[in-house]
Image (cartoon, grey):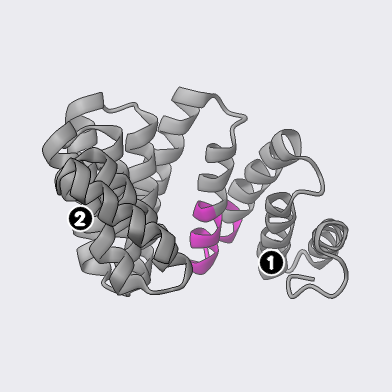
Amino acid sequence: LDLHGRILEWRVKHHGRNHTDVAKSFNGMAILHAKLQRYEEALDYYYQTYEIFNAQLGSDHERTLAAKTNMANVLGLLNRNEESLSTFEDILQTVTAAYGEEHSVRADALHSMAVVLAELGRKEEAMEHYDEAAEIYEAVFGNMHRSVANTLNNLGVLMEQLMLFSDAVRKHENALRIRITVLGEEHPDTAASQNNLGITLSSLKRHKEAIAHFEQALLGRESVFGKRHRLV
């Protein structure tokens, strides 16, 4: 932190308060504070990052959008979910106007909004956002992409919570198929899909199938983390 603070002071002195290099330093400070779980401080630095990028680069520039997204994520970590959702709604509006309906950045915003909506208990709305995000990811990247798998996985978890077990199984099966192909059998995300599918199958009383997936999840996690890790 001390080194980053000195670099920030130097940049402010030599470039002025509103230079993009100063914004980069603010962003670096924000990241460090977030890693230390000092979320209020991180939020303040991300806001200052956003203000500079917005003024110098415009509201639809990728750095401005990234800074605003980081603000929204930290607001979520602070349990300020309504503010987080409002910020993501602004991002979605900006991205749609600048890049159109089918852009991966728009899918990212929809996915993030779904996470917050689920936290707020608005799970049906969250499902709609996940669905739309998955459709865009598939249109942009194709069916076998990690972002598609992540969205299907989260959608499956949400459906499980809403007791839509058969639908959840299909989402988890698709997510697992993609992750095995793209990431491999032993990747932690693949193991997570195996575990999630096992949970949903167990809810449907399909216990033998569930056990098989739990065993695959266990093998995958042991190979990556060892036998004494909390996920094992």
Please, what is the three-letter code of the amino acid marked with disc 1?
Ile
Q: Which mark is residue 199?
A: 1
Q: Nearer the viewer, residue 156 or 15?
A: 15
Quarter-wise, where is residue 206 in the image? bottom right
> Who's the residue at 73% across and 62% down the image?
198
Amino acid found under the numbered disc labelled 2 = Gln
Residue drawn at point x = 74 percent, y = 70 percent: 231
Q: Is residue 164 magenta?
A: yes
Numbered marks: total: 2
Residue 35 is one of the magenta-drawn residues: no
Main SS of the magenta part reads: helix
Nearer to us in this view, 217 or 45: 45
Nearer to us in this view, 60 or 4: 4
Does residue 122 appear in this view?
no
Where residue 108 appears, as percent x and y from the top left, is 38, 42
Q: Which is more foreground, mark 1 or mark 2?
A: 2
Which quarter of the rendered picture does the C terminus lie within? bottom right
User: Is residue 52 positioned above or below 222 on the image?
Assistant: above
**For the point 25% across and 50% down, which residue is it?**
68
Is residue 21 visible to the viewer in this orientation of the structure?
A: yes
x and y, in percent, of residue 141 in the image: 51, 25
Quadrant the N terminus occupies:
bottom left
* Magenta-highlighted residues: 154-167
Above or below: residue 80 compared with residue 149:
below
Q: Which residue is mark 2?
A: 48
Residue 180 screen position, x and y as percent: 75, 40
Viewer-proximal residue, 41 or 204? 41
Mark 2: secondary structure = helix
- Along the horizontal axis of the image, is 25 left or right of 230? left
Q: Measured along the vertical axis of the image, is residue 100 above or below residue 195?
A: above
Asked if residue 206 lies left or right of residue 61, the reply is right
